[in-house]
Structure formats: structure tokens, C-alpha cells
Image: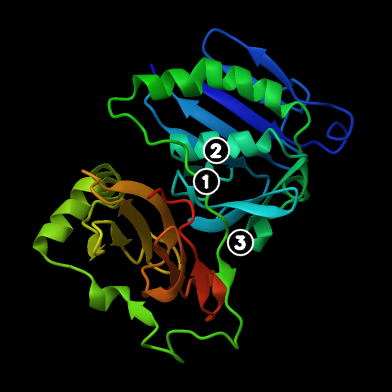
Amino acid sequence: MRWFILVAIFVWPSFAAAQSWFQTQGEHEMLLTNCPETDRPLEQGCMMIQCFWDGAFRLHLGLTVASVPPQSAAVLALDGVPTLQAVFVDNTGFGHPSNFATLISPDTLIALMDRMAQARVLSVTLDATALNLPAFSAMPLDGFAAGMAQFRDGCVDPMMAGLAQPQAAPPLVPTAPAIMAATEANPTTDPDRFASVEKISLNDAATLTLARSKLAAKIADVEADLGAPIDVFANLVPFQDGRKLMFVSLCHASYFGITGCETHLFYAPPSAKDLIWHQEWIGGGPYWLDLKSGQNGWPDLISVPHSARGAYVRSNFAALRY
């Protein structure tokens, strides 16, 4: 049997304003909520932070709409400041609204919770506008810090201690990408400044083998669901000081939503022995590196995601460690 510990963030119209967060604990679960303790149907929706005893952590949305899309990009904001970008996916594949979730690394989860403990309001905004329920626009965080401490003691810290591979130090939570102004230089107007990832990367057999090994479990799960193979594309960008960026796109027209692909980013600081997973995006590129703008030695990433409706978008790698 697979036990799990669950932290849930709920907002109900008649209780959200008056009720602070409280926590109940059983032998194998911990519940943190500002909802009444009942099993009645949701009225507006909820958000959960889930800790499973197989080492997985998820942000999970419970929705009251009839169905959900295969996936939707989302931005989590604290006190109105974009704090985390994520891609929520329908885990069932049947549009069931109570199974819309995104995996989150332990390090990013800890960094996110630390920021939530210092904030007043959490909001979630999804690209799929029909899913933007009123409950997600302003979720009060009263009492979150105390509940978070118990959640960490009961699940997160023991799970991280029990992981086979030590995790990196908690990074900064990635911020939402910014749509570039039409007047800014971009890959079309200044191709010498913006290096095409496809043109400057290694995409040989060794790179593809490495990419497949990093996402072996994900690829196996998708192919098992489909009953057919998917396409995997990999581009490894080496830097002169030894750091690396690897872009891995998983593609299948009937599985990965409207774009047909999702891209996972891995990175390695100088002298690192292994690549570290960072985040994922909807779509499969193209991507460019801005040779004149960046942070901590990492150039900004330029892309044209589906949600930007043809505009260039800038993401920075401030969260990546040296």
C-alpha cells in the first residue's frame, strides 16, 4: 500500500475570510486546510501540496469544471508577485477535473513553502482561462507557517533524508517568463546577439542517450499510456567554463496537448559530475540564448511559447547555481 501525506489549500466562499489554516493529523496523513472538515463536494476548487512515500511531490488542483485539458501552463504568485511557473497535467488522460497536477522537486517545494510562509495571499493563474476559478485568485495564507513546519517534520524532511541521491541546496523559485516588448531586440532583428540553441548545441547519439537516461521513467510512463513510442530530441549546450545546458523535448501529437511537445531543461555548473533537472515548458522550441543579457553567468533564454501568441518571451536562469 502506498501511503501519502497531504497538505491541502482550500477556499470556500463562506469560510475563507473567517477561518485560519488548521492541521489535523492521522497515522498516515496530515491535512492542512482552511475548509470545514467535511467530505461534501467542492464549491469552488482547491489546491493541494502532496507528499507521497515513493519520493514524489506534487502541486494538485481540485476543480469543479466539467473537464480539464491535457495540460495547462500556470503561474503561482505570492502577494501579486509571480513566484513559480508550472505545467499542470491531467493525470487520468480522461479530463477528470480532480486529477490536475504538476510534479515539483523537493528543493523547489521547500523554497516555495518558505516564501508562502512569509506571504499573505497565494494566487494561481492558468493559461486555460476556463480553469481560473475565483478560489484561485486570492487564497489567504493565514496560519500556513505553523502548518508547514509540521508538514516538513512529518513528510518533506524525512523523505529528503531517505532519498537515494542527495538533493542540491534549495534554489530560488523560478519566476514567470516575461513577454518581450515589440521594440526590444530579438532573434529576428538581431540574429548575431541571439544564439540558436539548435545551431550551437551537440545533438549526437551520445547526447540523445544521456537525455533518454535522464527522463527514462517519464518516457516509459508516456509510452505505456500510449502503447506506442514517442519522439525524443536533445540538445546539449557546452560552455567554456564547463557548465552545461541540456534541452530535452518529448513529442507526440496526441499526448502533449496543443503543441505536441514538452521540453525539459537540465543544467550543470562548472566541474559538476551530473546534470540537474530544472523545469519544463509546453512546446518543443525553438530556443535562443541572449549573449548580452543574463545572470550568474547564465544567458537569458528566449522562446516563443504557445501562450505568448507569437511573441518572444524571456526567461532568466537566476535560480541556477554556479
Q: Is residue 13 left or right of residue 136?
A: right
Furthest residue in direction front, as rendered: 241
> Picture coordinates of residue 216 (x, y %)?
23, 45
Where 225 falls versus 111 (above or below)? below
Furthest residue in direction bottom, as rendered: 189
SS for tag 2?
A: helix
Q: CA distance from mark 2 to mark 3?
A: 26 Å
- Residue that numbered label 3 is attached to: 128
Location of residue 19 by image quarter: top right
User: In the rendered structure, which disc, 2 or 3, sits on the residue that comes first in sequence?
Assistant: 2
Badge number at residue 172 = 1
- 2 vs 3, front mark: 2
User: In the rendered structure, which disc, 1 or 3, sits on the residue that comes first in sequence?
Assistant: 3
User: In the rendered structure, which disc, 1 or 2, sits on the residue that comes first in sequence?
Assistant: 2
- Residue at (60%, 62%) from the top-left corner? 127
Mark 1 and mark 2 residues within 8 Å of each other at the beta carbon: yes
Q: CA distance from mark 1 to mark 3?
A: 26 Å
Q: Is residue 156 visible?
A: yes
Furthest residue in direction top, as rendered: 27
SS for tag 1?
A: loop
- Residue at (38%, 60%) from the top-left corner? 262
Query: Which of the two residues, 182 or 126, is positioned nearer the viewer here?
Result: 182
- Residue at (21%, 43%) from the top-left corner? 273
